[in-house]
Amino acid sequence: MKSSKKGYTLIEVLIASLIFSAIVMLSLYALNQGLMQYKGILERGLNFWDTARVFWLQRSLSSAIDYYIYDERKKLWYPFFKGNLDKIAYITLSSFSHDTPVLAILKKEQINGKFKLVYYELPVYTANLKELEDILTFKTYQKAVKFVFFEDLENLNFKFYGYDRFRQFYDWFSEYDGSSFLQLPNLIKIEYTKEGKNNFLYFPINVQNLRKVFYNELYQ
């Protein structure tokens, strides 16, 4: 009587081994790339939790969108963005606790002579300019979701790199408003001092296109 049991052929074993080896190599490569990124940040003097906070900030700022609003006073469409040395307000697709676009606010707050970087967010749905301005003016965002990114800082400032359409060149600015520049900044810099050490964090915004400066002319 013949046995019905069949074993694996040499070819099948070799193919399975090759697939397994490829998976292991790809996994090791991905792990190595991740460790190299973490190492680069850690070498700048940041601890694990600071590193995690930087990645969260990177995710939020790089996902900022050009949320166009109409300004009745200026008769203009422009992307909502307001930034100065103490605060940034923008619309982002990457939120921490919602599944819709949110109004995100990064704010410099002071307590006991020290500064902290605080993040607020609340969903915007289809908010217009007045509704967004009211949120900032009356500070209703303070009742929304809140995270503290950095604290016990001796100093904290924001700066913005973008295209000046009047002078027609790129530069750094201490104030940046979408109504003046007609586009989002290309780069945001957060400067802070902690334990006497100056730190600089740079965050690119990924939706830039110089043609958007002429949005009103193109889509009148």
Image (spheres, rainbow, N blue to C red):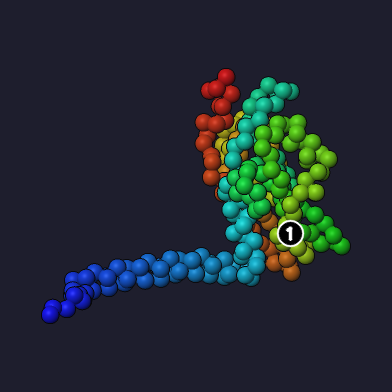
In the rendered view, tell whether residue 174 sits above or below residue 34: above
Q: Is residue 166 above or below residue 36?
A: above
In the rendered image, is residue 128 in sight? yes
Nearer to the camera, 75 or 113: 75
Q: In the picture, which quadrant includes the N terminus?
A: bottom left
Q: Name the residue furthest top.
A: 220
- Of all residues, the one furthest to the front in this rendering is 1
Q: Amino acid at mark 1?
A: Val
Residue 165 in the image: state x and y as whole percent.
59, 31
Left or right of residue 27: residue 216? right
Q: Nearer the viewer, residue 202 or 96?
A: 96
Q: Residue at x 70, y 26 (%)?
A: 71
Q: Report which quarter residue 73 is drawn in.
A: top right
* Residue tagged 1: 148
The image shows residue 215, relative to residue 200, as above or below, that is above
Q: Which residue appears farthest toward the left when viewing the image? A: 1
